[in-house]
Image (cartoon, rainbow, N blue to C red):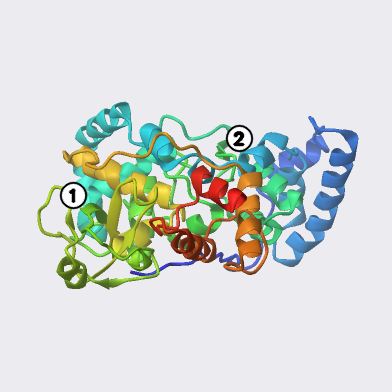
């Protein structure tokens, strides 16, 4: 299994810059659009200064002045977008709270209805790209509720806000330049560019760079149209995306498993990949007690620690992860696909007595681990492999199951020690 990093490509416009498009010309003739800011004056001034500086950078990359002025002239700074960026559900909720909503009975039933309605289309897409149709369907369900909720935030304003705000300025500026080039090419119009708070667009919520690299016109009738009410191009583009990310035809994303007594929790984690036969030899079995279904290599992950379900995940887990890196999202896609297919729910229950740690609590936990001498580096509140390894080391010191799960009881033990 591979961890596939996202790549942002900003493509040039073949044959030189086109003449200003009609919508851009009209906007220029009407003059500057009045900016309706909803933040304090200092933020408004800062955003205006950023927009002026970014204009120089965008034009240097091939964006025409008329396109830039027409698109960015109407852009607003959106404080709610910054707030959403700080509290994404995949990272701030417990995984069980996230899955309760993501894989609800209603979403499963709606997915089965959508599959029935578009059965021939899904069969054609699966035949062309080799990607499981249920997985494409699940992505559609999670990203836009099967097309019903595609977002109503201005894509230009969302990307401009995130680029100005600065946490990931380089990434969002590159996405915004790519979007301006999509407009410049005439692939769509500003009125269609409404989507999620993060700048993703269409039925399957493509970022501009993903659109440029992998969006397809499935029936060969023109440019890729992921914004239309017809989901054909968006669904085919999602399949093309997964195929490009290494999807292995006919194989699973993963499965819930039952760990043997005395399991070595140092083996758990996405970085520890072993042949499926190795795991079977240790006594790892499917949650229902049957033999493991996967091929090749896999890794055991414990998204809620030793008290919650365990999963053996395969290469297709990494393919889905290229869409969204959060384990909660990948498990939701895989499990929703399985449930729409007719599969059962989880066997092991979740530790619902626990709550998610707040950001200050995560930082405090890391500071306590540094104080204990089991962790080095900055306390940034991001619970990754290094923090989990440090948690395991501390848990071994105090004689509890070393599963590396960041939760309140472990923090309380760190405080008391």
Quarter-of-image position of residue 300? bottom left
Viewer-proximal residue among 301 and 134 = 301
Return the disc, 2 or 1, that comes first in the chain's sequence.
2
Few, some or many C-alpha atoms within 10 Å of disc 1 (few <14, some 14-19, many ≥20)? some
User: Does the image show residue 232?
Assistant: no
Q: Is residue 105 above or below residue 174?
A: above
Which residue sits at x=18%, y=60%?
250
Q: Which mark is residue 153?
A: 2
User: The residue tagged with tag 2: helix, strand or loop?
Assistant: strand
Front disc: 2 or 1: 1
**Is 81 located above or below residue 366 in the figure?**
above
In the rendered structure, the answer to whether residue 394 lies left or right of residue 260 reads: right
Label 1 belongs to which residue? 287
| Percent of width and height locating residue 363 | 65, 52
Considering depth in this image, is 315 or 68 the residue closer to the camera? 315
> In what quadrant of the picture does the C terminus appear?
bottom right
Q: Is residue 293 left or right of residue 3?
A: left
Identify the residue shown where x is 11% and y is 51%.
289
Q: Residue 61 in the image: x percent, y percent?
A: 70, 66
* Classed neighbour count for the residue bearing mark 2: other residues with Cα under 10 Å, few (<14), some (14–19), many (≥20): some
Q: Quadrant of residue 42?
A: top right
- Image quadrant where residue 140 sits: top left
Q: Nearer the viewer, residue 27 or 102?
A: 102
Instruction: Work out how far the residue at label 2 is from the one at label 1, CA to CA, in angstroms.
Output: 42 Å
Residue at x 57%, y 32% (from the top left corner): 152
Circle on res. 193: none
x%, y% of residue 99?
Answer: 37, 38
């Amino acid at each position: 299994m591979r961890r596939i990093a996202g790549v942002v490509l900003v493509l040039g416009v073949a044959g030189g810059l086109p003449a200003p498009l009609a919508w851009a010309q009209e906007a220029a003739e009407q003059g500057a659009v009045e900016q309706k800011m909803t933040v304090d004056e200092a933020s408004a001034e800062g955003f205006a200064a950023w927009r002026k500086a970014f204009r120089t950078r965008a034009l240097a990359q091939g964006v025409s002045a008329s396109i830039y002025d027409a698109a960015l002239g109407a852009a607003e700074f959106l404080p709610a977008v910054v707030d959403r960026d700080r509290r994404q559900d995949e990272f701030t909720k417990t995984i069980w709270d996230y899955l309760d909503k993501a894989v609800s009975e209603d979403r499963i039933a709606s997915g089965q209805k959508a599959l029935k309605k578009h059965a021939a289309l899904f069969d054609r897409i699966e035949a062309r790209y080799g990607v499981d149709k249920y997985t494409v369907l699940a992505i559609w369900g999670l990203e836009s509720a099967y097309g019903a909720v595609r977002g109503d935030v201005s894509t230009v304003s969302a990307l401009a806000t995130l680029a100005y705000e600065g946490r990931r300025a380089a990434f969002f500026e590159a996405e915004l330049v790519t979007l301006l080039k999509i407009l410049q090419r005439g692939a769509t119009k500003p009125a269609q560019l409404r989507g999620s708070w993060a700048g993703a667009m269409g039925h399957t919520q493509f970022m501009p760079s993903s659109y440029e690299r992998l969006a397809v016109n499935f029936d060969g009738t023109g440019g890729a149209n992921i914004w239309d009410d017809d989901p054909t191009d968006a669904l085919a583009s999602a399949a093309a995306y997964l195929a490009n990310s290494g999807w292995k035809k006919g194989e699973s994303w993963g499965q819930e498993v039952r760990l043997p007594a005395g399991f070595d929790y140092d083996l758990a984690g996405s970085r520890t990949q072993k042949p499926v036969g190795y795991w079977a030899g240790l006594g790892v079995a499917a949650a229902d007690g049957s033999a493991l279904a996967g091929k090749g290599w896999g890794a055991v992950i414990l998204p809620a620690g030793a008290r919650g379900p365990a999963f053996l995940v395969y290469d297709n887990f990494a393919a889905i992860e290229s869409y969204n890196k959060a384990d909660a999202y990948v498990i939701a896609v895989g499990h929703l696909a399985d449930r729409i297919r007719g599969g059962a729910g989880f066997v092991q229950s979740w530790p619902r007595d626990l709550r998610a740690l707040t950001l200050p609590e995560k930082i405090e936990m890391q500071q306590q681990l540094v104080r204990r001498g089991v962790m080095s580096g900055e306390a940034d509140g991001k619970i990754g492999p290094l923090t989990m390894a440090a948690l395991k080391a501390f848990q071994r010191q105090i004689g509890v199951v070393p599963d590396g799960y960041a939760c309140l009881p472990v923090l309380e033990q760190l405080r008391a020690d």
